[in-house]
Image: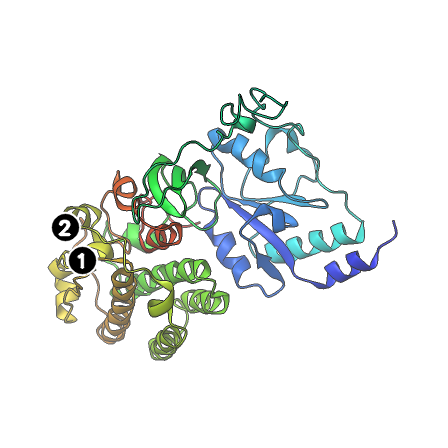
C-alpha cells in the first residue's frame, strides 16, 4: 500500500494515546506520561491508540465500546493487564502485561498503522444514533411544533430557568460523563446538569475505583516498618496527585516534572530530593499555579472535613493525624500541620507542606533507623474517611472549570485491599 506524504508526516510525530483506565491501571498512565515519543490526549477523537489499562468491570463494557468506536481510522486498541472485550478476544488482540515494553509496543503499533502495515481496528457498534429522533415538526423537522420532541435523545431547549449565580436565563444541559473521562478519577461516572457553565446538579452514578496503595502502607498495619520508607511513598503519592492537577491546568511540562520527581522518591538521596522539591515549588510559583489556575472555591465545611479526614481535613483546620500518636514519629519531632481556608488552593498548599515535612522526617529517620510504633491504624496519604454524598453538595454553583479543579484537589476513592501491582 502506498504511503502518502500525510502518513509519512504522521509517522514522524508522537503516538497519540487515549488512556481508558480500569482498576489498577494508573501505573501504565504514569509510565506513558514520562515517555517523550507518546502524547496522552483527553479525547478519543484525537487518538490513534486506545489503551485499556487495568480491569474494566462488565457493567462498563458498553461505555468502553462507545469510546472504542470514537477513534478515527486508522486506529488500534491495546489491552494492558486487561481482558479484551468479548468480540475482540482473538489472537493478536493487543493484550500485554509487560509495563516496560508498553511504550515501544504503542509506538511500533502507531508506526505500522500509519505505514499501512496493520489494518485499522473494526468498529463494534452499528453506525446508527443510539436514540432515534422522536417526533416531527410542522415542516418535517425534529420535534412537535417548534419546541417539542426529543432529537437523538437530547431534549430541545426548554424555557430557561433562573441561573444560580447571576440570574441570566440560560438553557440547561444534562449529560453523563465517565467512567473513562481522563480528567477525573478512573471509574467515576456522573450525571451533570449545566446551565451555561454553572453546575446545577451533580449526581454520582458510580464511585471511583478503589485506589491501590504501596505495599508498605498495608505492612504498617501488621507490624513496624521504617518511617523513611513510609514517608517516601507518601511523597510519591502526593507528587502523582500534582501530575493530575497540572495536567488539568494545561501545564504539561510541570506535570511531567512532578511525575519524574514522584518516580525518583524511592531511589534518590533525601538531600537531592529536597533540592528538587524546592525547585518544583519555585516553578509552581513562577508559573502562577496558585494565582492563575486554582479557584477560590470548593470549600469544605467542618462536617465535610471531619468526614473526609486526611490532608483535606487538615487543610480546613482539623488537627487529625494518626502519626501524632505514634511514638516513633514523636521521637522525630512530628507535629500536625494545618491550614484554615479549606478550599482548593489550601488543599494543594497542604500537600506541599506535608511533602516538605516528610522530607525532614526521612532525613531524621534514616539517621536513627526509626520505625513505626503504632500498627493498628496508619495515616494513609489520602485519608481514610468517606466521600459519600460530598460532590452532590459541594459542586453545584461552581463553574465547570472550578468543579473540575475541586474534584482534582480531593481524593475520593476508597482504599483497595490489594497493594499496587
- 253 to the left or right of 73: left
**On screen, residue 93 above or below 40:** above
The answer to which image quadrant residue 76 occupies is: top right
Which residue is label 2 attached to? 302
Q: Earlier in the sequence, mark 2 or mark 1?
A: 2
Q: Closer to the camera, 358 or 339?
A: 339
At 41% from the left and 65% from the top, the residue drawn is 262
Which residue is label 1 attached to? 316
Which circle marks residue 256 in the picture?
Answer: none
Whole-percent x and y of residue 291?
A: 33, 69
At 18% from the left and 45% from the top, the residue drawn is 307
At 66% from the left and 53% from the top, the residue drawn is 105
Whole-percent x and y of residue 52?
A: 55, 43
What is the distance, in whole Å, between disc 2 and disc 1 at their CAs? Answer: 7 Å
- 141 to the left or right of 403: right
Whole-percent x and y of residue 392?
A: 29, 39
- For label 2, the crowd category at 10 Å Cα-Cα, with few meaning under 14, some 14 to 19 and many 20 or more, is some
- 250 to the left or right of 220: right
Q: Closer to the camera, 338 or 419?
A: 338
Q: Closer to the camera, 55 or 3?
A: 3
- 153 to the left or right of 221: right
At 29% from the left and 68% from the top, the residue drawn is 352
SS at circle 1:
loop
Amino acid at each position: 500500500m502506498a504511503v502518502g506524504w500525510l502518513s509519512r508526516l504522521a509517522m514522524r510525530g508522537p503516538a497519540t494515546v487515549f488512556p481508558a483506565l480500569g482498576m489498577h491501571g494508573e501505573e501504565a498512565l504514569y509510565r506513558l506520561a514520562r515517555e517523550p515519543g507518546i502524547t496522552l490526549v483527553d479525547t478519543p477523537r484525537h487518538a490513534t491508540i486506545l489503551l485499556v489499562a487495568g480491569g474494566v468491570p462488565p457493567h462498563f463494557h458498553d461505555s468502553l465500546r462507545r469510546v472504542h468506536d470514537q477513534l478515527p481510522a486508522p486506529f488500534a486498541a491495546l489491552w494492558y493487564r486487561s481482558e479484551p472485550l468479548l468480540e475482540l478476544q482473538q489472537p493478536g488482540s493487543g493484550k500485554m502485561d509487560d509495563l516496560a515494553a508498553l511504550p515501544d509496543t504503542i509506538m511500533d503499533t502507531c508506526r505500522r498503522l500509519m505505514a499501512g502495515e496493520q489494518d485499522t481496528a473494526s468498529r463494534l457498534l452499528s453506525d446508527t444514533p443510539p436514540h432515534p429522533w422522536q417526533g416531527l415538526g410542522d415542516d418535517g423537522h425534529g420535534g412537535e411544533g417548534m419546541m417539542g420532541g426529543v432529537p437523538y435523545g437530547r431534549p430541545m431547549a426548554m424555557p430557561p430557568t433562573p441561573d444560580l449565580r447571576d440570574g441570566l436565563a440560560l438553557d440547561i444541559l444534562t449529560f453523563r460523563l465517565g467512567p473513562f473521562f481522563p480528567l477525573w478519577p478512573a471509574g467515576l461516572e456522573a450525571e451533570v446538569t449545566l446551565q451555561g457553565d454553572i453546575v446545577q446538579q451533580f449526581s454520582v452514578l458510580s464511585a471511583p475505583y478503589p485506589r491501590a496503595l504501596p505495599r508498605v502502607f498495608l505492612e504498617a498495619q501488621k507490624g513496624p516498618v521504617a518511617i523513611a520508607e513510609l514517608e517516601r511513598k507518601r511523597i510519591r503519592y502526593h507528587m502523582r496527585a500534582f501530575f493530575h492537577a497540572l495536567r488539568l491546568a494545561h501545564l504539561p511540562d510541570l506535570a511531567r516534572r512532578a511525575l519524574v520527581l514522584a518516580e525518583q522518591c524511592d531511589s534518590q538521596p533525601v538531600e537531592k530530593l529536597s533540592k528538587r522539591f524546592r525547585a518544583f515549588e519555585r516553578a509552581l510559583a513562577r508559573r502562577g499555579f496558585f494565582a492563575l489556575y486554582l479557584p477560590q472555591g470548593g470549600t469544605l465545611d467542618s462536617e465535610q472535613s471531619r468526614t473526609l479526614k486526611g490532608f483535606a481535613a487538615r487543610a480546613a483546620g482539623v488537627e487529625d493525624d494518626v502519626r501524632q500518636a505514634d511514638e516513633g514519629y514523636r521521637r522525630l519531632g512530628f507535629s500536625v500541620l494545618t491550614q484554615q481556608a479549606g478550599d482548593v488552593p489550601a488543599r494543594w498548599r497542604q500537600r506541599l507542606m506535608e511533602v516538605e515535612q516528610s522530607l525532614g522526617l526521612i532525613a531524621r529517620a534514616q539517621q536513627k533507623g526509626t520505625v513505626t510504633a503504632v500498627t493498628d491504624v496508619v495515616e494513609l496519604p489520602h485519608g481514610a474517611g468517606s466521600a459519600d454524598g460530598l460532590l452532590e453538595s459541594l459542586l453545584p454553583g461552581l463553574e465547570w472549570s472550578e468543579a473540575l479543579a475541586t474534584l482534582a484537589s480531593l481524593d475520593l476513592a476508597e482504599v483497595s485491599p490489594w497493594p499496587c501491582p
